[in-house]
Image (cartoon, grey):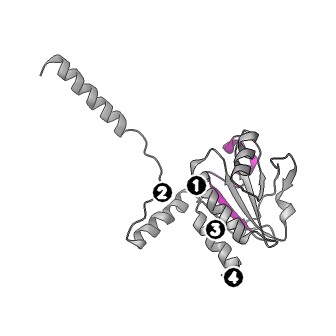
Amino acid sequence: MNKTTLIKSSAVVMMLIAVLSLPSCKRAPKKTVDDTANTESVEDLDAQYAKDLLAKGTPAPDFTLQTPDGKELSLKDFRGKYVVLDFWASWCPDCRKDAPEVKALWEKYGSEKVAFVGVSFDTEKEKWAEYVKENGLGWDHVSPLAKWKETQVSQDYKVNWIPSMYLIDPEGKVVFGTVMIDKLAKELASIAGE
């Protein structure tokens, strides 16, 4: 083996080591034929990303944030209704993926009995407002217009992953928190008596 071949081989080995030592991406599990294994994998997502969310029965912390048009909106404004709190951001790929499903749930269950409030972690008001408008996300939206983990609302609700969703009862207590839209859909169906 000559010197040039040895250098090339060493470079290839070093590149492989570098690639293999990169952190892996967190991805949703692929659907499998084995429903039991799939259910366990899906449950792992909530166990991994929603484990720190507020527990059932915890009083939901109140907040007052601004809507895209500059009005103030508080959680307490919705007392007497169930409230879906959807923590998201327009720059978040998983949030964008869930947005049509949240919209479908709002169209089906949003009513005098159930309010939807999107809490965005966007920092640019124009991008946030544009995304809401372009995608027909017609429920109430608020934002602190600050970086996600630096906000009081993310700390109060222990949001370590987005999207994260909560269902709050009419008395202002947490029914449950999740990172999985299908669990929210199940709970809303139960409230609606389906």
Mark 2 surroundings: few (<14), some (14-19) or many (≥20) residues within 10 A: few
- Image position of 49 with respect to 34: above or below: above
Residue drawn at (47%, 53%) of the image: 27
Q: Residue 97's spot in the image, x, y percent?
A: 58, 55
Disc 2 secondary structure class: loop
x, y (%) of residue 108? 70, 71
| Nearer to us in this view, 20 or 114 | 114
Where does the magenta region start and end? 145-168
What kind of residue is marked 4? Gly
Question: Label 4, on which residue?
Answer: 193
CA–CA distance in space, label 4 to label 2: 30 Å
Q: Is residue 131 magenta?
A: no
Is residue 176 at all visible to an observer of this figure?
no
Q: Nearer the viewer, residue 1 or 154?
A: 1
Q: Nearer the viewer, mark 2 or mark 1?
A: 1
Distance between mark 4 and mark 1 Cα atoms: 27 Å
Relative to 138, say whether 40 is above or below: below
Q: Residues within 10 Å of mark 3 (few under 14, many from 20)?
A: many
Mark 1 Cα within 10 Å, few/some/many (few <14, many 20+)? few
